[in-house]
Amino acid sequence: MKSKTNPWTKTELNIYILLLCANADAVQSEEEMNLIKSKVDAETFERIYREFSGDTEEEGIEKIEVAIELHYYSTMELAQLRKEMQEVFFADNKFLTMERNLDRLLGNIIY
């Protein structure tokens, strides 16, 4: 895993998680990407997207595990994050097995 000198903010972490959700089926649909872009400013999105694009799925999961430990998420914040993850998974009107598996994995990590 590449070392990161500055930890992500909660917003950056959320965007990275949503990008991972969008890529779960190896296809980032326009609907999924537009939904994620609508949640953050363009500069932050581009920075996190560049980092995401350079990572393997395993590196991404490791980064999420490390970053999630640095932030305290309230029950409401976790519920909102799960809702946003579901929105991304269903943005293309499909919920494939790969997406279900990632949903379970991320659920175990963030809770």
Image (cartoon, rainbow, N blue to C red):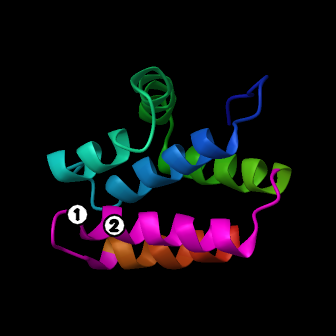
In this rendering, the answer to whether 18 lies above or below 33 is: below
Question: Residues in magenta?
Answer: 71-97
Give 18 or 35, whichever is nearer the viewer: 35
Q: Are marks 2 and 1 in contact (CB under 8 Å)?
A: yes
Residue 104, position in %: x, y?
52, 79
Which residue bears the numbered disc 1? 91
Which residue bears the numbered disc 2? 87
Report the amino acid beneath label 2.
Answer: Glu
Residue sticking out furthest to the front: 76
Residue at 49% x, 42% y: name it: 56
- In the rendering, which numbered label is found on residue 30? none
From the image, which quarter does the C terminus lie in? bottom right
The image quadrant that residue 30 belongs to is: top left
Looking at the image, residue 6 sits to the left or right of residue 37; the answer is right
Residue 39, position in %: x, y?
42, 44
In this rendering, the answer to whether 93 lies above or below 48 is: below
Residue 62: in magenta span: no
In this rendering, the answer to whether 23 lies above or below 2 is: below
